[in-house]
Image: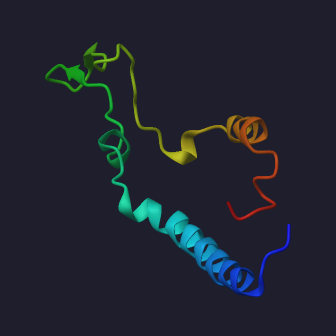
Amino acid sequence: MNLNPKWRRRVFRIFPAAVLAAVLGWFALPFAVPVPAGLSKDPAASPVLLDRHGDPILHLTLPDSSRAAPVPLEQIPVDLIACTIAAEDKRFYQHGG
């Protein structure tokens, strides 16, 4: 299929512009789309009812029948962190994310 020079010039002008628009659109998309409400806040901890001495009486569950409690990073065993990284991302320490 032979394209005349005028048509070829037009294609060579439009194609780079279309590629540039697609790349810019791809990188602008995260800023244009709102973050879902469930992802924008910290997960809730399960409520605990305490007696007057501060001892737990009842551990309540979250609406999805699960329990959650925040744990400081220092309290998580090193082996658990290593197992999670090994299972999720073997190259975790070799790349920037």
Q: How is the image coloured?
A: rainbow
Which residue appears at 59% of the width and 72% of the height?
Answer: 18
Rendered location of residue 73, percent (x, y): 54, 46
* Label total for image: 0
**In the image, farthest residue toward the left:** 52
Which residue appears at 30% of the width and 43% of the height?
Answer: 37
In the picture, measured across the screen, residue 29 lies left or right of residue 79, that is left
Which of the pair 26/63 is nearer the observer? Answer: 26
In the picture, measured across the screen, residue 45 lies left or right of residue 12, that is left
Which residue appears at 69% of the width and 34% of the height?
Answer: 80
Q: Is residue 13 above or below residue 80?
A: below
Rendered location of residue 40, percent (x, y): 34, 48
Quadrant housing residue 56: top left
Quadrant showing the C terminus: bottom right
Q: Is residue 12 above or below residue 51?
A: below
In the picture, measured across the screen, residue 59 lies left or right of residue 76, that is left
Rendered location of residue 29, percent (x, y): 45, 61
Quadrant showing the N terminus: bottom right
Rendered location of residue 70, percent (x, y): 41, 37
Which residue appears at 22% of the width and 26% of the height?
Answer: 54
Which of the pair 16/65 is nearer the observer? Answer: 16
In the picture, measured across the screen, residue 89 lies left or right of residue 49, that is right
Which of the pair 19/47 is nearer the observer? Answer: 19
Which of the pair 24/15 is nearer the observer? Answer: 15
Q: Is residue 15 above or below residue 44?
A: below
Quadrant housing residue 84: top right
**In the image, farthest residue toward the right:** 1
Q: Is residue 82 above or below residue 8?
A: above
